[in-house]
Amino acid sequence: MLLTQLNLLATAPDGVARLRELILTLAVQGKLVPQDSSDEPASVLLKQIRTEKDRLIAEGKIKRDKPVAEIAEEEKPIKVPQGWEWARVGSIGNIFNGDSINATEKDTKYAGAKGRPYIATKDVGYGFHPLDYENGICIPLDETRFKVARKGAILICAEGGSAGKKCGLTERDICFGNKLFATEVYGSISSQFILYVYLSSTFRRAFAAGMTGIIGGVSIAKFVEILVPLPPLAEQSRIVSRVEELMRLCDALEAKSRLEATQHAQLVATLLATLTASTTPEELADNWQRVATHFDLLLDRPEAVDALEQTILQLAVRGLLVPQDPTDEPANELLKKIRTEKDRLITAGKIKRDKPFQPIEEDEKPFELPQGWGWAQLVEVALRGPTNGLSPKPQELPSDVRCLSLSATTQGFFKPNCFKYVDVAAKVAEQFFLKSGDLLIQRGNSLDYVGIAAIYDGPDDAYIYPDLMMRLQFSQSVNTKFIHTALICAEGRVYFQRNATGTQGTMPKVNQATVATAPIALPPLAEQTRIVSRVQQLRAVCAQLRKKLTDVRNTQSQLAEALVETVA
């Protein structure tokens, strides 16, 4: 049943991860390979281990262990097959943690040294990958204060966010950190099988139940009490072989999925690029037919819908989304009206005189414009701004002033719940209160988000904006939503990313001059309105497509979950 439903599991969200988890669950439940009644039962193996431990204690090679409590029936989480036994971790191997090294000692004494690799938590993966032995830190062989985990030991992270999750099998003798536990198994127990047990959901639930503390961790005293299922040795070997075979299949499914995603992204990028390369509406119509032919195939992933939406924005600001009307008042007349309005406000003392900036050079214009359009700098179409905001000291208790956080505009639209109450006098905050329709631009953020723009559409005087944002206010002679479209399209984002400073290690920022001189392809006002209306319609379609894909994926996920529960 598992193999017949592989396609469903592989194509569901996180499907291959679920499949890996299911394989391990079946393995530790004894459902992955058949039992053989001729196998020597695990009870005999446990007696042999007890004899071996007594010998090692007598030889002084290990310390005498504390008596372990008998395992009560109600402790056993699941029923195991005939010939299997439940055992405590402390009964199947020697458990010990490693030794810490401070940063100075690591750099001055052990970096580049010769000897055994020193494995820290960061050098351990999540069970299916080898440890990182080439991290540059080694412990000389003559060092005596470091414990050594021999080849074949199982490491598991015991503390912090990776506790119970990071696991690995040593392929050579190592030294290791104090936040890791090593299990050196007794007898002929398969280290690989015990690793699979540690990775199983059954064991992880037991591990999580024993975690304590703010950081989160499990003590050795609690760790050794956790139960593990133990099959006969021969069955351990069969299980390991079967798990390895199925994990290779999972690897192949993941590789296939990555390749398909890459090829799909390349196909989407190629076809959508033909749209943005169109120079006339007629050419765009022809190119669109090619895309429309493969619409269902192309738009079967959220990232493809995102690419389509960005293409729509690019077509909008290039004048290819709606037809031009030769009777529309051209953009140069629109700019004259805005200039007249600004001069009137300057004369009335309502705004400051704006600084003159160099006009846009020909090589700075990224594409040709339709008739009636014109290139303008952002400052030419704004009445006020760009101006930085204010970031007063935040406070926990509600106050009269709320200041937006960067998260309020990072997605390109206003989110009213992202704010902090701040301690500032209302008089000081007055000039920073936002008005509906204000355009906000983030002057500092990661490179992916620096310069991102959003329109404030909340109530007047309800929020102030922080120092890491700039505000611009526009006249009625320009459509703010069109300006926003121009700033969040691909060309607008590239402009801010290319002109950001501090990209090497510090938060990238854009200054007021960069924002002010951002190039805007400006259509007539009537066409701006038509473009905005069309963009809103098409973005609504994109939102519907995303919802449809989300619903399909949720259904796939539910079916996969039901299958996992049925098989397990």
Image (tube, rainbow, N blue to C red):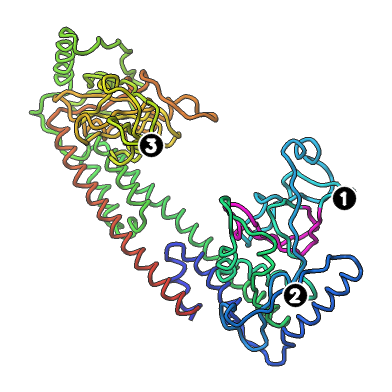
Q: Name the front one of labels 2 and 1.
A: 1
Q: Relative to 349, does residue 428 appear above or below in the rendering?
A: below
Q: Say which element carries label 3.
A: loop
**Proximity of marks 3 and 1: CB atoms separated by less than 8 Å:** no
Residue type at mark 3 is: Glu
Residue that numbered label 2 is attached to: 189
Q: Earlier in the sequence, mark 2 or mark 1?
A: 1
Which range is magenta? Answer: 147-175
Task: Tell me the amino acid under the disc marked 1.
Answer: Thr
Pick the residue in front: 21 or 378: 21
Give the mark count: 3
User: Which element type, helix, strand or loop, lies under badge 2?
Assistant: loop
Say left or right for 94 vs 357: right
Mark earlier in primary sequence (3, 1): 1
Residues 211 and 280: in front is 211
Tag 1 residue? 144
Numbered circle sitting on residue 396: 3
Hey, which quadrant is residue 476 in on the image?
A: top left
> Residue, x 54% and y 69% (percent of image)?
21
- How many residues crowd mark 1 within 10 Å: few (<14), some (14–19), many (20+)? few
Q: Is residue 174 magenta?
A: yes
